Amino acid sequence: MPEKNTPDSNRRSERSRRAIYDAALALVAEVGYPKTTIEGIAARAGVGKQTIYRWWSSKAEVLMEAFIDLGAQAAEAAGAGDWAKNDSIPDTGDVEADLKTVLRATVDELLDPRYEAPARALAAEGLADPSFGEDFVGRLLMPSLDLYVRRLRAAQDAGQVRADVDPYIARDLFVSPLAQRWLQGTGPLTHAYADTLVEYALYGIAPR
Amino acid sequence: MPEKNTPDSNRRSERSRRAIYDAALALVAEVGYPKTTIEGIAARAGVGKQTIYRWWSSKAEVLMEAFIDLGAQAAEAAGAGDWAKNDSIPDTGDVEADLKTVLRATVDELLDPRYEAPARALAAEGLADPSFGEDFVGRLLMPSLDLYVRRLRAAQDAGQVRADVDPYIARDLFVSPLAQRWLQGTGPLTHAYADTLVEYALYGIAPR
């Protein structure tokens, strides 16, 4: 008989969901993504395998939602502003300062051990499985990239970025270098690096 | 009895090696990396499994060397100059033109179906297996990144890039956006995109 959708069963579902997220994140950090299984997640969360399969089709899906939830929880716990809730990049009227703030925060997050293991696992799975990759990029990556586009458009309105600049291309100058250093280890990932990227992209590397 | 290192056995080895490379590249393109196995490569190349294990420790290693060889062969067949042989980026005295030439060629290569399947497989494996990733980045990626550093230093000597610019950071403005669009599909990868990146990075997106 299907479970009825009462307040009590909703509370139970919510508890199970949270336990499953915690188990998935803990296992990926402890034994690595390849050795994490739906069975292992179920056992650790104290639920049946079927409970997981009712909501998700693969361990990658579980981990992606656990990761999205982790970001939302962290933002709430910190009483964070709109930026950390992924709604917008701050606009103090100074695009250089605002981009530095956001890129420094991104460096901190990429290096935070709670995020690093699941984020790397999701990125790797996204490359290995193109249809999961599309989902991962669409749900996790593109929304943050769009925040840069919006902030750059505001900077264009304020005359701090040239009106003829394509914000979808300019966005990549800030975001992609961090992504590549983090994914492929092509150089150190520091606040100083983030600051320098912002300065080079805004003012260019040729003599003014 | 170990095979003696005579001219004949060297020729045989060279033939086997080439057959193994071809088989690895063909299988990855046809059935995908996850379904490619050492056994499958050996069968297709007409060699014993032991021949492969004598030279390589994993299918990822075989594929990486096949890919390096593919690049070297293509450069030779095209009678290509130093750039395609991975020795240097052209220096015509115009850094903007030279970077556009190289980035356009990189776009073409990234979209060439012969390169795409193995390159994606190697990048995915590099994320999934950190020690292979380190090897992959060190042997395949860093040497090409260093070409940008050298070309940017020459541009500094010629007064086309500011002397206080760190070429290891500036390099990322050109290379990382292509890498991310290719790896994660965050936007179209075209010659026009390559040209615009070069212009933004050289002259900045803020008003001059």
Image (tube, coloured by chain):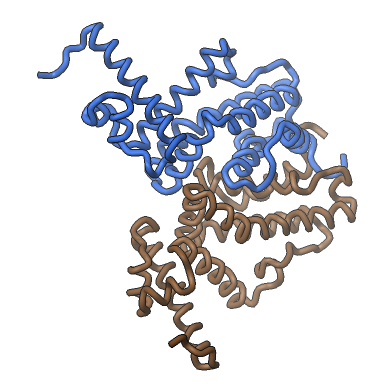
Chain colours: A blue, B brown
In the picture, residue A56 is in which quadrant? top left
Determine whether B202 is above or below B52 in the image. Answer: above
Q: Nearer the viewer, residue B143 or A42?
A: A42
- Residue B96 at what x, y percent from top left? 77, 53
Depth order, front residue of B84/B33: B33
Q: Position of residue B185 (x, y in %)?
A: 50, 44
Where is the C terminus of chain A found, in terms of image quarters?
top right
- The residue sitting at 48% across, 17% down in the picture is A73
Q: Residue furthest left?
A: A1
Residue at the outermost top position: A7
Q: Residue B200: x, y in percent?
A: 72, 41
Q: Is residue B22 visible?
A: no
Is residue A8 something one can see in this rendering?
yes
Using the image, determine if residue B131 lies above or below residue A169.
Answer: below
In the picture shown, does residue B108 fall above or below B53? above
Q: Quadrant of residue A43?
A: top left
